[in-house]
Amino acid sequence: MIAAFSVSPAGSEEVSAAVAEAVRLVRESGLPNETNAMFTNLEGEWDEVMAVIKLCVLRLAEDSPRVSAVIKVDYRPGVSDALRGKVESVERHLA
């Protein structure tokens, strides 16, 4: 599955340090991932991905009384390497 998610402390104007901490946790997870201006995409099994997202939320909650999380899931059992494959498929149509 792929999850596109974002986490940030609520009620704070400057969130880049907190977001960077969450991205660091994602990268340390070893799961395939990519970060863009709005979301971090994470690929793996359901429990692995959700555990990383939970870890990010709980880490940010250590420094903020409220954390906002947005999660979008593409659940396709048996599919792997979709993080790269979905983009490649679109690029073939653009070529």
Image (cartoon, rainbow, N blue to C red):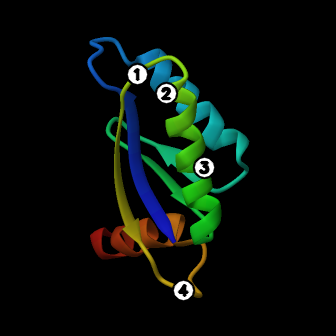
Measured as percent of width and height from the top left, residue 95 is found at 33, 70
Per the model, the C-alpha gap separating discs 2 and 1 is 6 Å
Q: Does 90 appear above or below 68?
A: below
Q: Tell which circle, 4 or 3, labels the residue nearer the N-terminal end.
A: 3
Q: Nearer the viewer, mark 3 or mark 2?
A: 2
Element carrying mark 2: helix
Q: Amino acid at mark 4?
A: Pro
Q: Residue at x 42, y 65 (%)?
A: 87
* Pointer 4 with pointer 1, Cβ within 8 A: no
Q: Tell which circle, 3 or 2, labels the residue nearer the N-terminal end.
A: 3
Q: Does 50 appear above or below 40?
A: below
Q: Which residue is mark 3?
A: 52
Report the label total.
4
Q: Which residue is mark 4?
A: 77
Per the model, the C-alpha gap separating discs 2 and 4 is 31 Å
| Res 61 label | 2
Element carrying mark 3: helix
Q: Amino acid at mark 3?
A: Val
Q: Tell which circle, 2 or 4, labels the residue nearer the N-terminal end.
A: 2
